[in-house]
Image (tube, grey):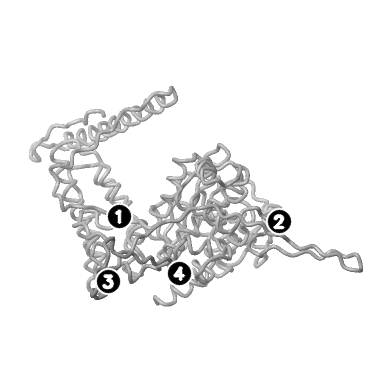
Amino acid sequence: MSKKIQLPDIPEKEQTPLVKSLLVLLEQFAERIQLQDEEMASLKDEINILKGEKKRPQFKPSKMDQNSHSGSNDDDPKGSPPKKRAGSNKRSKKDQLKIHHTKRIAPDETVPEGSRFKGYREFVVQELVIEVHNTCYKLERWLTPEGKYLTGQLPENINNQHFGPKLKSYVLYQHHHCQTTQPLLLEQLREWDIDISSGQINQLLTSGLEAFHDEKDGILQAGLQASSYITVDDSGARHKGKNGVVTQMGNDFFAWFSSTYSKSRVNFLELLRAGKQDYQLTEAAFSYMKNQKLPKESLEKLQTHFNQHFMDKERWQALLSITKKRHQRIATEGALLASVLHHGLCEDLAIISDDAGQFNILLHGLCWIHAERLIHKLVPLNQSHREVLDVVRGQIWTLYDDLKTYKVAPESGKRQEIEQTFDEIFTQQTSFATLNKALSRLFKNKDELLLVLERPEVPLHTNGSETDIRDFVKKRKVSGGTRSDEGRRCRDTFICLKKTCRKLAISFWEYLNARLGIGELDIGYLPDLIKERVAATI
């Protein structure tokens, strides 16, 4: 790591206007040099990796001097005592376990005559039975006097496949829930005497899954219509050797994912349509275009088609006679937004993001964790800067605590106090010029950062989205990316279903078994369950 540049501390009384100007320039130059050093170090690591060598080791600071009770999470960045481990209290296992087999064991010694039987001392042992269970279905064939053949039919959940639904459920669970790769699945199943090939495993993971895909599409539509807010995020997701992006949308009741090659606002609006393909030129479309400063000439061309619907992208492109790409993009965004609103999305849906531009539509809110990160990443160049930075960060987290309190018990008087505190923090001028610029930038986002004052139900952060999308990061590290369109579609679908089941407190294993016709539990249609859970919280 490069050594941080230290600037001398100059007493305030000795700082003339010229000295102050020079100090500001020095801060900017020192920060730029620091960033360039870090970038060069990162590029050197990439070159070493391409050469087949290892990158520089990163040594984390020692935690020996930290309080053993300290902890941290994104919702409480200042740290809090760790909670007691779930399930650590003593409980009876026998009351919750299903007993499949009971075995009585007599004492090894001969029981003397006259002894009295005093019952049993029960000792429950949990075991997992893994064994191959092959079934040969002999389908009767009869020839009728008319020369017609009558043949017995396979059970409905077999679907003419040579692998049963329990095996298919296991393969889906291991691959999508446990992140087990296809080669490892092949090795494991063959060790258990399953006669299967790599192609057949791929078929189990990608074919005959339309019911799952349809349920995944219904999750987004139900979630958007029933919810008052969503959090959003995106991450890298390679496909066919090319860099792509996966977009996440969700809240406490659902999680939905879609992988594309674009992370533009047009792409985000296309995803918000929840499977619809139309474009509409309604009042909402033209209102958006005016706000985005679409030129009057282009607006007048489009207004001749007011209230018209275009069923697909080809028909919309045929109409779009605007030459400049930026103006085409604005017009397309407006037509897509009108389509989204026409299909049931509420205009007051709050979208909470990390300040990525493509998500800034409708009622937009910002994540406080990402906002504070702009301050946290600043590089103090001397002791004075470090002290100022610590004070400002403390002020921000105190305000954050006040906002959390306000969410629980909204009070109008408290709201005015919070707004005043926000203004004082983000308009102050310190001796750290770079910090002043960051504070000024955040002050411009006041309405988005204080959205919770208008809508106490919305979250203050996007931690849920970052947690949900972490599966894609792990998948990318393990497998790199997908190689077929159907593989990418299945990855998006089953991560969506798994995360949604978890939010609804449903076992993903039981869900897979239920959908494949072998489950003991009757698990309802997930979009309907989302609507019920959201309605129950209102």
Image spot of residue 340 (x, y percent) = 56, 64
Where is mark 4, residue-wise?
Answer: 227
Q: Given contact means CB atoms under 8 Å apart, are the residues at marks 1 and 3 in contact?
A: no
Is residue 8 visible to us here? yes
Q: As displayed, is residue 5 above or below residue 369?
A: above
170 vs 361, nearest the viewer: 170
Q: CA distance from mark 4 to mark 1?
A: 29 Å
380 relative to 318 in the view: left or right = left
Secondary structure under tag 1 reads helix
Q: Which mark is residue 408?
A: 3
According to the image, label 1 marks what residue? 443
Q: Please, what is the three-letter code of the amino acid marked with disc 4?
A: Ser
Q: Which residue does the image show at 24% across and 76% down from the upper left?
A: 116
Q: Quadrant of residue 333?
A: bottom right
Q: Residues within 10 Å of mark 4 (few under 14, many from 20)?
A: many
Distance, label 2 to label 4, CA atoms, is: 32 Å
| Residue 422 visible in this rendered orientation of the protein | no
Q: Are marks 4 and 1 in contact (CB under 8 Å)?
A: no
Q: Amino acid at mark 1?
A: Phe
